Image: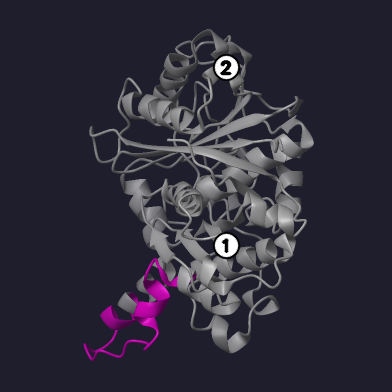
Amino acid sequence: MKYTRRVVVTGIGALTPIGNTAREFWGGLAKGVSGAAPITRFDAEKFRTKFACEVKNFEPNDHLDRKEARKMDPYTWYAMVTAEEAFNDSQLKDFDSDRAGVIWGSGIGGLRTFTDEVMSFANGDGTPRFNPFFIPKMIADISAGYISIKYGFRGPNFATVSACASSTNAIIDAMNYIRLGHADIIMTGGSEAAVTEPGMGGFNSMKALSERNDSPETASRPFDKDRDGFVLGEGAGALVLEEYEHAKKRGAKIYGEVIGGGMSADAHHITAPHPDGLGATNVMVNALRDAEIDPSEVQYINVHGTSTPLGDMSEVKAIQKVFGDHAYNLNISSTKSMTGHLLGAAGAIESIACLMAINKGIIPPTINHFTDDEEIDGRLNFTFNEAQEKEVNIALSNTFGFGGHNTSVIFKKLVD
């Protein structure tokens, strides 16, 4: 389908384990910084995994009204801070509020709030003394509501929940709502704050997390032979998507164009990817078709690349199926090697990484590569350990989630 309305990115914001602004985040990526360290949120001594990629040096009261912050779960703190950065970055003024919306993703929502309230009840005398803000703090759509209230966005407003694909689903939905004429501006992205006792314990029980407690900073090692699971991360990423003519008319700074998005399902297993990468293949094909480009036009793929044995292998198979011989011309990297896995917020910060690669001409690395995996084609360029300079006109970002949810979004350097 040929759309007459183009969609561009005019503002970005990030709060991550390697930087508390979009600029700091990019600096950490370009330098190959690891955000993994021993957990400080709680005593993890009895947990199999004792480390994570936490947001650092963050105090909510430095950014939010103290009274309002108490009504929010940390995942909403992160959403509000990044949305403010993106809004300010976009320099939006005098816009039609009825044509501005919010579409926000989170895989889990207010896990800290849920944990605290349920444990308080369980440790009490059975009398239900729940906080009146328990439900509003916990639900996964509340961040979208808070953002719309703060900026007066009265257009489309909802949350996407598709596990680790959530914020990419949000970006694709935002792109399509603008394409279809339902809005001119949409604040989109995602946030997650799952470094909690149930978050760590639950993923540990699935054997999904790395247990490399002797070397947390090297634990996330996508495509390495000795990878043993992902590192849990937290934070948020926000993007202001805007209709191109609307942005051009006000002289907005433009990071790039969102030219296509794809979605698919593995229809295979609730947690394991399809072993042949079937869903991952389909989603990239769908995104390329939607963008109306040939696979040979892509220069960079920010892969899902979580550092799990099955996931990394299936994604490599899919890339080789979709891109054929051109796969050897691509730069591929997993920035989760640095940030850990931000679950529902992963797609948002990885989309920002793609946009910055386009703007800076630098491919962020896949760090922590020590041993080649003989089952992975060594001719592929995974940008191991050091960033590489490269002109990037088109970048693709993959995010896949439990339940077999697959999403891909494609960004392009703006061409008038």
Q: Is residue 338 above or below residue 202?
A: above
Q: Name the residue under label 1.
A: 40
- Give coordinates of residue 252: x percent, y percent: 75, 56
Dividing the picture into quadrants, the one containing residue 415 is: top right
Q: Does the magenta stretch include residue 166?
A: no
- Spatial separation of the CA atoms under disc 1 and disc 2: 45 Å
Q: Nearer the viewer, residue 111 or 326?
A: 326
Q: Is residue 194 visible?
A: no
Q: How many marks?
A: 2
In the orientation shown, which residue stands out farthest toward the front? 4
Residue 138 appears in the picture as rendered: yes
Instruction: Say if the magenta span includes residue 132.
Output: yes
Could you classify mark 2 by the number of other residues whose Cα lies within 10 Å: few (under 14), some (14-19), or many (20 or more)?
Answer: some
**Quadrant that contains the C terminus:** top right
Q: Position of residue 55 (x, y in %)?
A: 61, 59
Relative side of 115 to 67, left or right: left
x and y percentages locating residue 282 in the rendered image: 36, 27
Would you place residue 192 above or below residue 308 in this image?
below
Residue ID for mark 2: 296
Query: x and y percent of residue 406 in the render?
Result: 38, 38
Residue at (57%, 65%) from the top-left corner? 78
Three-letter code for the amino acid on which mark 2 is drawn = Ser
Residue at 44% x, 12% y: name it: 375
Q: Which residue is drawn at 28% across and 33% down?
A: 266
Q: Residues within 10 Å of mark 1 (few under 14, many from 20)?
A: few
SS type, badge 1 = loop
Marker disc for residue 169? none
Q: What residue type is labelled 1?
A: Thr
Magenta residues, as a range?
119-143
Q: In which quarter of the image is the N terminus?
A: top left
Which structural element holds mark 2? helix
